[in-house]
Image (cartoon, coloured by chain):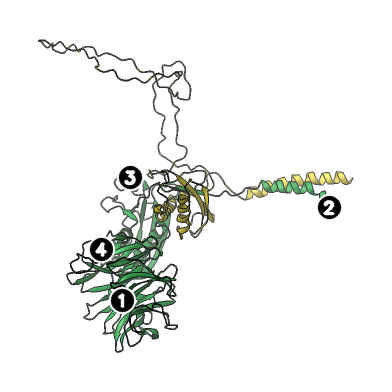
Amino acid sequence: MKAYSRYFPHLLIVLATLATLPITAQDWIHAGTNLGNERIRLAVADFKPVGDDPQTPALKAAFDATLFNDLANAGIFDLVSKSMAPPAMPGSPREIDLAQWSAEPANATMVAFGALSVTNGRLAVYGWLFDTHNTVNPQVLGKQYNEAASQDMARTVAHRFADEIILRLGGGINGIAETKIYFVSSRSGIKEIWAMDYDGQNQHQITHLGTISLSPRISPDNTRIAFASLGHDGWAIRMYSLELNRLVSFPAGTSKDLNQSPAWSGDGARIAFSSSRSGDPEIWVADASGANLRRLTNFAGPDVAPTWNPRTNAQLAWVSGRTGLPQIYTMDQDGSNVQRLTDGGYAISPSWSPNGQFLTFSWNRKYGPGAPGGQDIYVMDIASKRWLQLTHDAGSNDFPSWAPDGRHIVFERAINGRNQIWTMLADGTEQHQLTQTGNNYMPNWSWK
Amino acid sequence: MAPAAGSLLLHGGLVAVLLLYGLIAGLIHHHLWGSSGSGAIQVNLISALPLPSDQPPNENVLATDTPSQAAAEPANKTRHAADQNILAITGKNKPKQNTRKTQQHEPEPDNLARYGEQAGSSMPRSIQPEGYTSGQTTVSDSDFGSLFSYYVRAVNTKMASNWYKQEVDPHTPRGSRAYIQFAIHRDGSVSNVQMNQNSGSQTLDRSCMRAAQRVDTFGALPSQYTKSTVMTSFYCEY
């Protein structure tokens, strides 16, 4: 030790030198709960057309309209209406005058702008999102897109840009602008599975089976649709592959009895459905390939319409008629821990929210002869069992389905025998009709 | 000889270390004032300087830089002279003098010396983003709040929507605050949720911590932000 103690002062000096090296400081955010949470006031400028290709005006019109609608539908922005926005079309960060957008009457805190051009059949879009109050560092987003020039791609690019803005400003939840809704339509004469964009555009038929198909459920990876179909051996759960454009086999779904209402688990590994192969309809679970079929419930009375907890994939909610009228219950994935959620009336079609906290279902709380019942969509917080009625006095509402952002619900509304598909925000506001032709039923929102 | 050599070595080593440190630290540029994210006061280019307001010269003999807390001397009351142009109203009523019927209550003079009332002119030294009238962030030395105010707003909204007020005991006094802190990582995930300062109500503290634990993600940190975590200090006020 004595030899080493000679170097003790040297060690001290080295340590002293090291202590003077600069340490990077930690950044802090200070915030609180009562500081006000208004909706973000967002202005969307018309994009600047660049070049003189004849396709540009039409594509620009589709792009502008789609971008505006997507951001208006998101439910988190207070959009500056086009008549209040300054009459400017800035096409690049050099051209924008932020003071113009943050002043009256626009009063925007964020502005989305950019340029759109068509060259040689390719559509190029440059988009920016700027913070109008931050003159030092205004850029929040800067994106560029290059796709084939067509109306569909113009809308797709607008959907993608809107999703980026919603992801950035909405606190980490993906936007729904590129999601699809799968539904049943009888406009071709027989009930088949159809699909459309989340805003009702691009409605097209998927299955051409020539037989009644009900309750479509898209898989979490957007490749297969499970649905109930009437075949030569009764009602069976069938699987349609969107990649192969044909039916693929699902052996567990076929039996000589009634099989209906399939439900995918959030990881796409299992499917739960209702089957009456054991006598009365019970909830059964199988792997997505059809293997490992097992029964979960064992009660008298029908058990139908299961839905998984997409967050934990370890719980199911379903409708059971064991006490008479159908009520909503939850249970664990092995069938234990059965709990009842509704206390009366006629409750059907549960759908579990993506964050695992809420259930939406259709409920007629005053059901029975002489009771002024209305079938309405409700949202219930599962932990506290508090519920909120979303639709009032507007037809008979059924089959609600959550959007993957947890902010929107799509449902079926029947007025005077006409059934159409509607969408709304999860607090019941902003109800819009999505389908107009024929009769449309049982919508299902895709997972992403 | 050995101690002298040792001493020489030590002093030579000291000088060498100092020189080396100066060289190396000078090459690595940290925290240049004015660069983004370096802890400088943010300055914005503006087109017009706010000039101090014109103040009339003060008549008081004693004048200091700090404004006095005592009230200024009240101005002398002047009586309005009767206007010469008014036609005399014949009859019983004489033109009334403009006397006040009620005495206005004057503030009690406190026994403080009266100083000059000039307040110093102040120029804005740090410019906060205007328009956020609810004062969402406090711009301390770090730039995060002023550079990425939209992210701070997203944090606010997410926390507010995840905080369930009904978990708190209704007997908790209004205005009690529970302060928590947590770290936000690059992908927006939350970790290290800790209690900073109790509010005195256990249910409020627990509900505030649970709100932070409920959050999956606040959204990825802005790409222009270079560090890997941001600490957040958040309070839940009942």
Per the rendering, the mark at residue A1 is 2
Horizontal side of residue B116 vs A322, given as left or right: right
The answer to whether residue A380 is above or below residue A262 is above
Say which residue label 4 marks: A432
Structural crowding at the residue carrying mark 4, measured as other residues with C-alpha within 10 Å and reported as few (<14), some (14–19) or many (≥20): some
Tag 4: residue type? His
Structural crowding at the residue carrying mark 2, measured as other residues with C-alpha within 10 Å and reported as few (<14), some (14–19) or many (≥20): few
If you read the primary sequence from the N terminus, does the residue marked by circle 2 or circle 1 appear first?
A: 2
Most extreme residue toward the left, as rendered? Answer: B91
Image-quadrant location for residue B227 = bottom right
Choose mark 2 or mark 1, whichever is in front: 1
Q: Chain B in the picture: what colour?
A: yellow
- The reply to whether discs 4 and 1 touch (Cβ–Cβ < 8 Å) is no
Q: SS class of the residue under badge 1?
A: strand
Q: SS class of the residue under badge 3?
A: loop
Say which residue label 1 marks: A215
The CA span between labels 3 and 1 is: 50 Å
Q: How many numbered discs? A: 4
Most extreme residue toward the bottom, as rendered? Answer: A232
Chain letter behind tag 4: A
- The reply to whether discs 2 and 1 touch (Cβ–Cβ < 8 Å) is no
The answer to whether residue A317 is above or below residue A50 is below
If you read the primary sequence from the N terminus, does the residue marked by circle 4 or circle 1 appear first?
A: 1
Choose mark 4 or mark 1, whichever is in front: 1
Say which residue label 3 marks: A103
Tag 1: residue type? Ser
Tag 2: residue type? Met
Image-quadrant location for residue A422 = bottom left
Q: Nearer the viewer, residue A155 or A253?
A: A253
If you read the primary sequence from the N terminus, does the residue marked by circle 3 or circle 1 appear first?
A: 3
